[in-house]
Every structure is written in C-alpha cells, then in structure tokens.
C-alpha cells in the first residue's frame, strides 16, 4: 500500500506542476485580492484533493488516500478561506459522490479540519509556504483523521482494523506529500519571481539608455536610437517604432520593405492604433504585411501614448525559426508603458520651461516700471548738468531694456547677463554716486556659459536696494564667478545692513507677491533654479544684521543655448 500511495503521489504532483506551468495559470500566486481568485484557488486545491481520493486502493469500504496533502497545501497557500473551501470540496465529494462507506463522515470531517487549520497556521505565520508547518500539520492532521475514524465509525472493530492497515501509510505519505507539494509550489513561485525580476531589470536598463533620446519627443532620430538599443539588448528578429502615420525606424529582418518613412501597412499595427490594446500576432496573416516574401513570422505591437492619446507603436518581430513568446510580450508591454511615461514627462518639461518663461515676463512687468521711473529721473537730472553723462546713461538704459525685453529665451551666454548687470549698476551708480562701489571677478572662460536670463541682475539689485542703499555711507557689491567641473559657481556679496534668519527664510518662501519691493526677484530666481536643475541648485543665502549678505548658487552646464 505504501508503494501505491507513493506512486500516485508522484503522478498528482507532476500534474500540479504541469498545470502551474500553463497559461492562464502563469500568474498563479499567493497574493489574491478578489473573490473570483479565492474561488479559483479553492477549486484548484479542492480538485487535487478529489484526485487524492482516487490515489489508493479500496480497503474495507474505505480508501487509503492522499486528500490531506492537497488541502493542507491549499490552506498554507491561501489562508483559512481557501483551506476550508478546498477541504469542504474534497470532503463533500468523499461523502456524497464517492464510495461512501462506514468511515465517510470522519474522513470528510478530517479533510475539512485539516484545510482550515492549515489556513489558520498560514495566517499566523504570514508566509504559509513553510515545509516545516506542512510536515507538522500532516502528522497531526492525519493522526486526528485516524482518531476520528475510531471515534465516529461503527462497528468499532472494523474501524480499528482499518486504522491498523491504512494509518501509518497515510500519515507518512500525506506528510511527505504536503512537504513536497509546498516546496514545489515555492520553487515555481521563486522561479517566476526571478524571471519577473530579470525582466524588470532589463526593462529599466533599456529605459535608462533610451531616456536621453526620447527626451526630445518621438521622431525619426529618437526612434532610430531607441530601436537600436532594444535590438541590441533583446533576442528578437526585428524591432520597429512608428508614429500614428508612418514607420519612424525599423531595424532587423524585413528592412528591405519595412523602410523608415513609409506609411504604416501592417494590419496589426493599424488595429493597435485604433483600439489601443497590445497584440501578440502569431502568424504572417495576423501581421498583415502585403509583401509576399516578408520574413516576419510573428509580432508584438504595443501602443505608445501621451495621456489618453495614442501617438505611435512599439513593435517586436520574430522569424519562423525564432517566434515570439509571452515573456517578450510582457517585456514589450513594460517598455511601451515606460516609453509612454518618458514622452509624457517631456511634455511636462516643456510646460515647465514655458511656465519659467511666463514667470520671467511677470518679473519684467513688475521690475521695469519701477526701475524705469527712477532711471529716467536720474537721466533728467544729468541732462541739466552733464549732457555727456546723460547720453551714456541713456545708452546703458537702452541696452538694459533691450536685453530685458529679449530675456524670455531658455538660456543666454553669461556675457549677456553680465552686460545686463553692468548696465543696471551704471545707472544706479549715477543715481547714488560713490555710495555704490562694485567689484567684479569673472574667471576666464566663463563668458560663454549658458545661464537662465534675468538671474544674476535681480540678486545684485536686491543687494543694492535692500543692503547697501540703506546705509548712509553706502557699501560694496562683489560679484564673483568661477567654474568648478561642470558647474558655474556664482557669489553675490554686499556689506549692507544684512538680514535676520527669519527674513532670509521669508525671502525664498513661495507665496503670493504684490510688488517687486517685496523681493519677488530673489524668490523668482530661487524657484527657477530649483525648477530647472533640482532643489539642490536653489539659492543659498547667508546673512546677519549689520554684517551684510552673501548669496551663492550653482548653474550646471545646459546642453545648448536656446
């Protein structure tokens, strides 16, 4: 009998392993969140409990069986509901449908109890797929099973005779069976987790290499580089990327007629563009290429989106010798999702730049009238006393205003920004005289560095207006600019009245501003730097009352002047 049970156990475990390897059971796992999944798991282990009933020989109106190993595994896998449900299914089958017999009630009851107890143990352990728990429950559960047969079956002599024959084999084989069943399911899950982990790592690696190309949007150049990276990293026969009208790139077999720039011809691609649903194409007729000798045998097409709008497709192709499978289908869907996210982020980046330009315009609207009024008053005064100086100041004001009106571009050379600063300081020195002294130190080679416009001048202006202009004797503005690796380091210092720490905090805290006199220039500079380059690139302000103020910030090298 022991040999028969072991033989049948092997067949049951082999069947379970094969089932777990098939679709749609590939996603079979321990995390279930819906009633439908719970019912599925109860049915799965209940079915194997029923199969376990037929695993032995008829003995004295009873059966030596392997029901327990299935329901114990079900309880440890899915918890009390799954364990009790599987036990109920297998137990009711034993009582109502199968052979019946004088031991039917205790056998069915024992099966239900074993499944429920295994589920409660799994809830206590957290991770129920533990072979030690399976072994302990198998021994205790089958011992209880034999005890219930002796307690509830009549005549007692027949029950005792039955237990003597089947007791030890059932305890041993069901215990070992539960241990091995749990271990096999654990191995299946671990293999899938490793495969999923490898796939996720591959997706992220490809996404990391393609992000710099897709940053410029979906076009022929970015599609070509992206397709090349995918083709080099994934074993497929060809890869293609399209927009919603034409092929942007095709690398691999079939490139003699699937050419860059041609209109979309394949029926599968058109279906994805219309429905937005990914497709696994299992034959040339599904691909729908009209070229008679096309070597493309199978295909995967996934949509590329911006929000709800489908803007293109990512396509994998396989040959007859190397057709595509479900693993590469999931890989393509993951890449399509990440590429769509990258393309959406590019839109957000563009909107951020547009918002920064709008902020500059708002800053211009608030600074210009105030500064222009004071400048014209100063020039008017010089017109009566020093016409040459008035002419120079008019030229400075003209340069200042011209650059101010043209400062909504993304980046400008540092030399342009410094001219803006010098024009501003020339007008302010004419207004305040010797009370404003300036010292500028710009390291060689920095003049062409790309910087956001209207960035240094507002900070210098803040030092003049709120620092040294409030001292009767005036003070010194120092501007120091140097390079450190791939960053431009800027320092603006004044020896003016200084600020308390709470004033510094207030100066760079985002809030609704009413006028330039409240420090909108400094706040705007801080926010733009953080927005463009990251929070670590915002302004660093050190100041103490009566000791002056120091403003430091860094500007990483921008890719191009815009």
Image (spheres, helix red, strand yellow):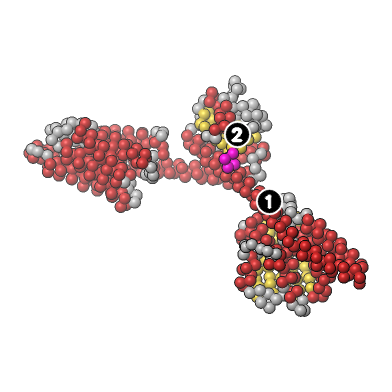
- Give the residue at x 21% y 35%: 94
User: Looking at the rendered structure, which numbered label has been put on residue 99?
Assistant: none
Residue at the outermost front position: 514
Secondary structure, mark 2, is strand
Q: Is residue 256 left or right of residue 234?
A: right
Would you call the spot at circle 2 few (<14 residues within 10 Å), some (14-19), or many (20 or more)?
many
The image shows residue 461 at horizontal and vertical percentages of 74, 67
Q: Nearer the viewer, residue 484 or 557?
A: 557
Residue 163 appears in the rendering: yes
Marks 2 and 1, Cα distance to the nearest angstrom?
Answer: 33 Å
Q: Which quadrant would the N terminus be assigned to in this image? A: top left
- Give the residue at x 74% y 70%: 465
Q: Which residues are magenta?
A: 305-309
Q: Which residue is mark 1?
A: 354
- Give the residue at x 73% y 61%: 366
The image shows residue 223 at horizontal and vertical percentages of 63, 38
Relative to 460, say whether 264 is above or below. above
Please report whichever mark, 2 or 1, sits nearer to the chain's N-terminal start. 2
Residue 308 falls inside the magenta stretch: yes
Q: Which residue is mark 2?
A: 240
The image shows residue 38 at horizontal and vertical percentages of 34, 41
Q: Nearer the viewer, residue 467 or 114?
A: 467
Disc 2 versus disc 1: nearer the observer: 1
């Amino acid at each position: 009998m022991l040999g028969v049970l072991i033989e049948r156990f092997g067949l049951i475990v082999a069947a379970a392993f094969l089932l777990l390897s098939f679709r749609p059971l590939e996603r079979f796992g321990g995390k279930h969140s819906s009633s439908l999944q719970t019912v599925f798991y109860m049915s799965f282990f209940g079915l194997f409990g029923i199969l376990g009933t037929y695993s032995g020989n008829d003995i004295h109106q009873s059966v030596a069986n392997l029901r327990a190993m299935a329901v114990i595994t079900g309880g440890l896998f899915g918890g009390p509901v799954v364990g009790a449900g599987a036990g109920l299914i297998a137990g009711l089958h034993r009582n109502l449908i199968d052979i019946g017999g004088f031991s039917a009630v205790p056998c069915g009851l024992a099966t239900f109890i074993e499944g429920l107890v295994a589920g409660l143990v799994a809830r206590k352990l957290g991770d129920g797929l533990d072979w030690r728990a399976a072994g302990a429950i198998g021994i205790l559960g089958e011992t209880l099973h034999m005890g219930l047969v002796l307690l509830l079956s009549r005549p007692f002599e027949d029950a005792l005779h039955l237990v003597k024959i089947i007791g030890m084999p059932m305890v041993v084989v069901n215990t070992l069976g539960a241990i091995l069943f749990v271990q096999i399911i654990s191995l299946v899950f671990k293999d899938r987790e490793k495969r999923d982990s490898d796939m996720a790592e591959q997706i992220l690696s490809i996404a990391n290499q393609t992000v710099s190309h897709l940053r410029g949007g979906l076009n022929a150049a970015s599609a070509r580089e992206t397709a090349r990276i995918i083709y080099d990293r994934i074993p497929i026969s060809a890869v293609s990327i399209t927009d919603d009208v034409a092929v942007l790139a095709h690398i691999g077999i079939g490139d003699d007629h699937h050419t860059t720039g041609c209109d979309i011809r394949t029926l599968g691609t058109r279906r994805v563009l219309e429905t937005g649903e990914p497709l696994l194409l299992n034959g040339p007729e599904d691909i729908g290429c009209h070229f008679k000798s096309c070597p493309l045998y199978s295909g995967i097409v996934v949509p590329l989106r911006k929000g709800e709008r489908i803007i293109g497709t990512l396509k994998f192709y396989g040959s007859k010798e190397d057709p595509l499978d479900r693993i590469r289908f999931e890989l393509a869907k993951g890449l399509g999702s990440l590429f769509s996210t990258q393309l959406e982020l590019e839109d957000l980046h563009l909107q951020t730049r547009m918002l920064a330009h709008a902020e500059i315009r708002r800053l211009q609207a608030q600074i210009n009238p105030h500064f222009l009024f004071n400048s014209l008053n100063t020039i008017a005064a010089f017109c009566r006393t020093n016409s040459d100086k008035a002419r120079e100041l008019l030229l400075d004001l003209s340069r200042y205003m011209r650059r101010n009106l043209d400062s909504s571009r993304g980046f400008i050379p540092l030399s342009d920004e410094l001219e803006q600063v010098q024009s501003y300081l020339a007008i302010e020195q004419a207004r305040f005289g010797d009370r404003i002294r300036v010292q500028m130190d710009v390291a060689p080679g920095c003049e062409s560095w790309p910087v956001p416009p209207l960035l240094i001048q507002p900070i210098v202006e803040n030092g003049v207006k709120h620092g040294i202009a409030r001292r009767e004797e005036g003070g010194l503005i120092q501007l120091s600019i140097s390079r450190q690796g791939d960053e431009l380091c800027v320092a603006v210092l004044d020896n003016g009245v200084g600020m308390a720490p709470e004033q510094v905090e207030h100066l760079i805290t985002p809030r609704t501003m009413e006028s330039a006199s409240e420090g909108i220039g400094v706040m705007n500079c801080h926010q733009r730097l953080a927005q463009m380059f990251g929070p670590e690139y915002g302004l660093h302000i050190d100041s103490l009352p009566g000791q002056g103020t120091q403003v430091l910030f860094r500007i990483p090298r921008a890719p191009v002047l815009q």
